[in-house]
Image (spheres, rainbow, N blue to C red):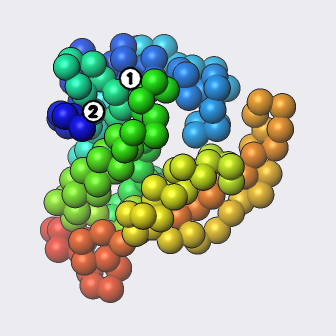
Amino acid sequence: MNLTLRPCADADIPAIAAIYAHAVLHGTASFELDPPDEAEMMRRRATILEGGYPYIVAEREGEILGYAYAGAYRTRPAYRFTVEDSIYIAPSVQGQGIGRVLLEALIEECEARDFRLMVAVIGDEDSQGSIALHTRLGFELVGILKGIGYKHGRWLSTVLMQRPLAGGTHQPPTSPIA
């Protein structure tokens, strides 16, 4: 596949913003209706990094093909060991396994940071590729929120999946902030 995975840099934001804009305008992975500009994408990335979460890109020959990050599932302190994953792939290379490579790396990065559970909030039941990817990497279906969002002229559901990380939830975290 000849991909390079690396931490996201400031210079990657224009490509990331373009990938995300396509997802917002044409897909259901995001329930946003209007794509944010580059300044907003930079701000969001800074928030992720300041929180101690991973944010990675996949590139080939200098071209950003996709990106993934983990962020807080919820902001209440008891959720601090649970993360939510986000993965976006450039439309021209979807279905080539880049999402799998990014998600595998994201899981590894989160386990190294002592996060214990990863949650996938997948936009719409029709997102079979994303559901299958998460299933292959050990996520299990935990619920579907029916008709929770309205986009592209139709009601969309949200598929919730989860995967244990590191020691999972069968033992306390090893972090000093536990």
Pointer 2 and pointer 1: residues touching (CB < 8 Å)? yes
The image shows residue 88 at horizontal and vertical percentages of 44, 35
Query: 105 or 38, which is in the foreground?
Result: 105
Query: 171 or 119, which is in the foreground?
Result: 119
Asked if residue 161 lies left or right of residue 34, the reply is left
Asked if residue 23 lies left or right of residue 145, the reply is left
Residue sitting at x 54%, y 49%: 129
* Residue 119 visible in image: no
Q: Residues within 10 Å of mark 1 (few under 14, many from 20)?
A: many
> Mark 1 highlights which residue?
16
Q: Specify which label sits upstream in the sequence, 2 or 1.
A: 1
The image shows residue 76 at horizontal and vertical percentages of 45, 59
* Residue 57 visible in image: yes
Amino acid type, label 2: Val
Q: Residues within 10 Å of mark 2 (few under 14, many from 20)?
A: many
> Mark 2 highlights which residue?
57
